[in-house]
Amino acid sequence: MTITFLSNYINHHQIPMAEELYKALGDDYRFVETEPMETERVSMGWDSDTASLPYVVRFYENPACAQILIDDSDVVVFGGCDDESYIANRLANKKPVIRVSERLYKSGQWKAISPRGLIKKYKDHTSHKEDPVILLCAGAYVPSDFNIIKAYPGKMYKWGYFPPTSEENLDELFKLKDENQVTEILWAGRFIDWKHPDDAIEVAKRLKKDNIPFHLTMIGGGGMEDQIKAEIVSNNLDEIVTLEGYKKPDEVRNYMRKADIFLFTSDYLEGWGAVLNEAMNSACAVVANSATGATPYLIDFGNNGYAYKNGDVDELCRLTKQLIGDKNERFNLGTKAYETIHETWNAKKAAEQIIRLSRMMTEDIGIPDPADGPGSKAKVIPVRKMFEAIKTGKL
């Protein structure tokens, strides 16, 4: 069986699954890049040197070879690219396609009323609901968006992003965290409005006001950096909040290993949020915004982390205070968080599901879906009901 994964470019979040697929399929697996990586991503420490990867084919360097792979492979996995022309021949010839998609309506489902948008989405998605096309939902809000346009009924599966999974000795990891003089809180991401670095600063302000010992490290940079720096100065947070700037992915992991608590504050514009996978893999006690695509799928409320309703900064602060005051709870949440990534939400499991779903589509056989994790059936949960679903575990 030949499988080709088609996306804009491969990055450190995608390489682990690609390696697992190449290990399983050898030269019957290829990853086609349609464009070079953006300069901004490279400046953030993302590695753009993919030419040495044996399974990567660059469409922009060898379009004829790449198109043959796309047209002739048994299955094409298509995501991260908006140009439908790459798979037009496959769709016309009813050849199997596994789509991977984040949300259609990140900024609000009210946008579904656009006639022009509905026409395109009908052409790209709804018109193929009887064809051999299934959808991997890279985020828990994806099924609700696609349900609006009546696409992929009964053919939507849980999915996400699968950054490198680190094999950790939990005893050693918690010893490292125990070396912190005070509770170490970590935030990581671009300093832009929808990632809400200002919410992390608000947490710091309230903790200081309540005389609670802590230290906050913030990794990243961006348009809000001057604002964040000004807030640190104006609230006399210089000694308890440290800005580290951009770091390479492996450096961010080292900060996560030392952190006790990780704050994940992005809103609905965060389609997934692989930083959550990474923090959980580092056994952090996580407090995550329910609005991100990853939170409902990864967080088992009160068991491996906590979620708060989008915009509820009071609850974000309350949960952070609770975790600072309870080392045993941090240990229990961190342990379960690590197990969630190590045992279920990882690249190896994802690759197995790509192969399972591909066999299901090409061999016309029924292979049972996993009970949970990548490749399990995705429920359609309305946006307004998602937080309650997270708290009650009805996902």
Image (spheres, grey):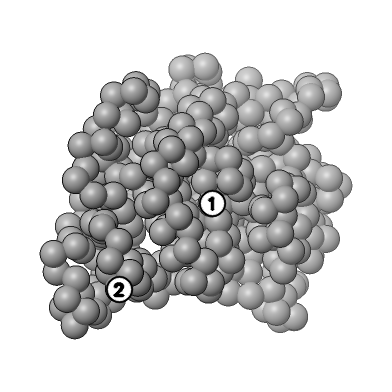
Position above or below: 346 against 99: above
Disc 1 marks a residue whose amino acid type is Tyr
Can residue 46 be seen? no
Q: CA distance from mark 1 to mark 2?
A: 23 Å
- Quadrant of the rendered structure where residue 381 is? bottom right
Position above or below: 301 against 51: below
The answer to whether 280 appears left or right of 68 in the picture is: left
Q: Earlier in the sequence, mark 1 or mark 2?
A: 2
Can residue 360 be seen? yes
List x then y, in percent, for residue 228: 25, 75
The residue labelled by disc 1 is 306
* Residue farthest left in this picture: 239
The answer to whether 185 appears left or right of 358 in the picture is: left
Disc 2 marks a residue whose amino acid type is Lys
Please say if the residues under marks 1 and 2 sit with CB atoms less than 8 Å apart: no
Q: How many marks?
A: 2
The answer to whether 218 appears left or right of 79 in the picture is: left
> SS of the residue at dot 1?
strand
- Is residue 185 or residue 378 the one in the foreground? 185
Task: Identify which residue is drawn at 27% across, 29% down.
Answer: 175
Task: Identify which residue is drawn at 75% across, 80% down.
Answer: 113
How many neighbours does mark 2 have within 10 angstroms: few (below 14), some (14-19), or many (20 or more)?
few
> SS of the residue at dot 2?
helix
Residue 209 image label? 2
Task: Identify which residue is drawn at 31% across, 53% down.
Answer: 185
